[in-house]
Image: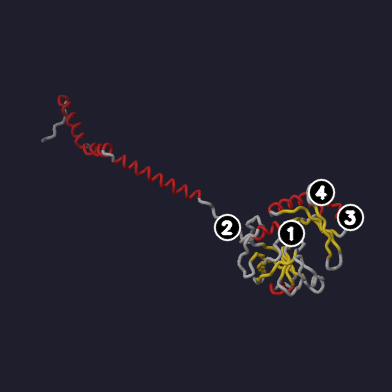
């Protein structure tokens, strides 16, 4: 059929044909819409989408709320309430040794009552239970060995363990006198030592504030401490060189955290007077 340009007389007919052609051309789309909307397809898609969204929400909820795994730093304390016997504990600091022919400790009773023999593998520690074992590693020579705790000390700020003469020799620092070491509680066969809270009840912590040779100074310090703290005790100790010292101690604590807080309070109140409190056991 030849194309006839529309003229005013057939505009109405032309418009009707054009509209009809558009409806026919888009009829499949209309049918598709009918099938999608009224046939339930979109409802199915929306249903599936809801389930998918729920699964995604559960996934992110589990991922974001999963307990965080905290790895303690090497040489740190996991802060077990039973003190230094918590599994995984490792203490890093300076070690010294005793039992030379000049210091006078050989043949004297140790804190657990046995006679100190510098040729046995033993050590002194301020807080580890008497009779327990530790692995000591010289961080400079990488030598290590297991020793038994049978004494208290060292009573010098900055040092964490005092080993016997033989232990110092085997660790490789007997000529130097001190060494940087790592101390780790273990069983006698070298396995990590389990925690034993009953030790803290039988041998609680205390804080040594000072060790004074003048008894009058010790008495005055006790009176000052009694203004802010309870259970102040004064102990006499005979040193190997024959001198007598008076050890001023504060408190009785079954939890290490409580002892640490009290030691911080003591340092804050009396630190300007040269007091250097440290935590030890009562025996």
Label 4: which secondary element: loop
Label 1: which secondary element: strand
- Label 3 neighbour load within 10 Å: few <14, some 14-19, many 20+: few
The image's colour scheme reads secondary structure
Tell me the residue that label 3 is attached to.
216
Label 2: which secondary element: loop
Q: Nearer the viewer, residue 273 or 248?
A: 248
Q: Nearer the viewer, mark 3 or mark 1?
A: 1
Q: Quick check: 232 left or right of 61?
A: right
N-term-proximal mark, 2 vs 1: 2
Residue at the (72%, 70%) spot, across then down = 122
- Label 2 neighbour load within 10 Å: few <14, some 14-19, many 20+: few
- Of the 4 image quadrants, the one containing the C terminus is bottom right
Q: Which numbered tag is attached to residue 71?
A: 2
Query: How far is the residue under mark 2 from the one under mark 1?
Result: 29 Å
Residue at the (64%, 69%) spot, across then down = 188
Say whether marks 2 and 4 touch (CB < 8 Å). Answer: no
- Of the 4 image quadrants, the one containing the N terminus is top left
Q: Quick check: 214 left or right of 141?
A: right
Can you name the residue that lies furthest to the left here? 1
Q: Which numbered tag is attached to residue 226?
A: 4
């Amino acid at each position: 059929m030849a194309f006839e340009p529309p003229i005013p007389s057939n505009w109405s007919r032309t418009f009707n044909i054009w509209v009809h052609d558009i409806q026919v051309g888009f009829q499949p789309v209309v049918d598709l819409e009918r099938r999608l909307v009224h046939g339930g397809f979109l409802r199915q898609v929306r249903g599936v989408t809801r389930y998918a969204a729920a699964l995604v929400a559960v996934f992110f909820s589990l991922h974001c709320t999963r307990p965080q795994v905290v790895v303690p730093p090497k040489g740190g304390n996991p802060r077990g309430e039973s003190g230094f016997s918590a599994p995984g504990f490792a203490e890093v600091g300076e070690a010294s040794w005793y039992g030379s022919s000049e210091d006078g400790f050989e043949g004297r009773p140790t804190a657990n009552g046995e006679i100190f023999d510098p040729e046995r593998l033993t050590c002194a520690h301020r807080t580890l239970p008497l009779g327990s074992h530790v692995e000591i590693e010289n961080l400079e020579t990488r030598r290590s060995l297991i020793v038994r705790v049978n004494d208290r000390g060292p009573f010098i700020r900055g040092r964490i363990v005092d080993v016997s003469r033989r232990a110092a020799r085997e660790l490789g620092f007997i000529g130097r006198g001190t060494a940087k070491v790592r101390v780790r509680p273990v069983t006698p066969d070298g396995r990590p030592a389990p925690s034993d809270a009953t030790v803290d009840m039988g041998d609680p912590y205390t804080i040594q504030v000072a060790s004074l040779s003048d008894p009058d100074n010790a008495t005055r310090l006790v009176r000052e401490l009694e203004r802010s703290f309870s259970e102040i005790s004064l102990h006499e100790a005979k040193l190997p060189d024959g001198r007598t010292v008076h050890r001023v101690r504060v408190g009785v604590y079954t939890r290490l955290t409580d002892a640490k807080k009290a030691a911080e309070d003591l340092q804050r109140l009396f630190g300007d007077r040269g007091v250097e409190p440290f935590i030890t056991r009562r025996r």
